[in-house]
Image (spheres, rainbow, N blue to C red):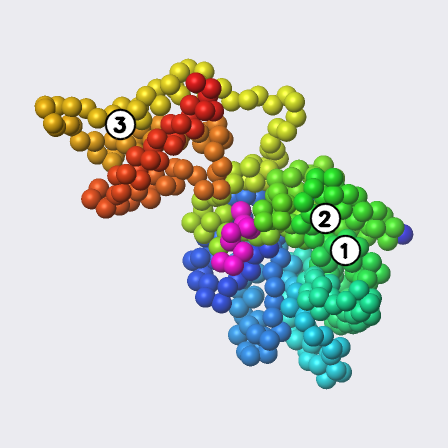
Amino acid sequence: MKPLADYSFVRGVCHGPGPNFSQEKLEKELSYCKRLQLNSTRFWLSQEEYEKDPKGYIDFIGNFMRTCWKYGVSSMPILWNGNFITDFKEPTEEEYAKAYDYAKAIIDAFRDKEFILMWDVINEPMCNDYLHKCSQEEYQDRYDTIKKYIRRLCGIVKDIDPVNCMTVGHEQVKHCESTVDLVDVISYHDYLSIREDIENAILEAKELGRKWNKPILNTETGCVGRANPYDIELELAEKHKVGWYLFNLISEGFWGDIHGLVYPDGTIRDPAVIAALFGFYRNRTEKRIRVNANKEGHAYRAVKAVEDALRVEPTTLFMSKPKSTEDILRAAEYCVNILEAAEMVPMWNPPSARIECWRRLPEEQRDIYEIKQFAYEMAELVRKNCFF
């Protein structure tokens, strides 16, 4: 029996080239991979796009993968996608022949390139409306039909390239049984919502790997919209020495509101995720130390700064000294910096972002009443969370 291969070194992201990507944008985003010590990318190909312009398409994805490799990032191209299967009928022999020609063109163009980590035959073939929306009575027959289809695709890829590794990116560990005898690497996705379930999925995949003497990879994970925290996934992957691909590198577009590590400009949404990439995880034990944000009296001073900014200061009879919106924003920022640094406010929409939005407006366009209300609310939060 061959020794079990080890892919625990894989620190990947799902990230592919867009149709309107400039080389400058591509290089900038891949530079984030280097800074985050990411070493692989998994991305979707399209038979339809290839057939429109075979040479142009191969040049396009070739440039992407070569640029990835320039930044130390290998590639796992996904040849087909199973997510959008609706009313499925098994392909005809003519359609399978076209699929073969497409796969052969892609594989022959890149099979000997050092940047190819492995081929992902098809993404999540059991995750689609064809299976999810059918009746319980229909499910097994439909599952078996899809299983036959993906096994045929696996046969195509292995026939074209018997040397390089091949996998199938299954939605769940239990689906891996459908192709486990054909693939070189067992690949599953994990968007589970409970720590225990996430860890059990890893153990289940590892057990399947031991049974078949094959390595495992988690090739999609991390989604704040599914209660699937990136940092917990990374912590457990490190604990069990499992390689991974996070979905996805850039927060933008359709998935930008629940996925992604970095914004296009290099800023980030969640520092805990970036820390976890470097092996630093949140302390969730009884040994954690609660922040004492008023230890040196700054909470008192911040609240007083807001009170002073909102106070009416008479100058002469019937007259008062006007306060600028900047005076109020400076006082509010004092409170906000306490709240954000101590994580006393939700950071999915940080209060400091509102301050920056106001500051980008000319003074005459700022709503002073809205700013006053904001400052008052921030001071009240400081008072509440610092217990005075």
Q: Quarter of the image holding residue 356?
A: top left
- Which residue, given by chain and number where applicable, does mark 1 sit on? 185
- Whichever of labels 2 and 1 marks the residue nearer the N terminus, that label is 2
Which residue is pictured at 48% across the width and 38% down the height?
A: 347
Disc 1 secondary structure class: loop
Label 1: how many Cα within 10 Å (few below 14, some 14–19, many 20+): many
Residue span colored magenta: 253-261
Magenta span: predominant SS is loop
Foreground residue among 142 and 187: 142
Residue type for callout 1: Val
Q: Residue at x 45, y 66 (%)?
A: 20
Q: Measure the alpha-carbon separation of dots 2 and 1.
A: 9 Å
Q: Which mark is residue 7?
A: 2
Amino acid carrying mark 2 in the image: Tyr
Position of residue 342 in the picture relative to residue 374 (left or right): right
Give coordinates of residue 351: x percent, y percent.
Answer: 40, 37
255 inside magenta stretch: yes
Up the image or down, 166 lies above or below 340; here it is below
* Contact (Cβ within 8 Å) of mark 2 with mark 1: yes
Q: Earlier in the sequence, mark 2 or mark 3?
A: 2
Q: Quadrant of residue 382?
A: top left
Which residue was labeled with disc 3?
309
Q: Residue at x 71, y 66 (%)?
A: 133
In the displayed structure, would residue 338 be above or below residue 85?
Answer: above
Residue 27 shown left or right of residue 97 in the figure: left
Q: Nearer the viewer, residue 376 or 269?
A: 376
Residue 225 is a magenta residue: no
Asked if the residues shown at circle 3 and circle 1 are in contact, with their CB atoms under 8 angstroms apart, the answer is no
Closer to us: mark 2 or mark 3?
3
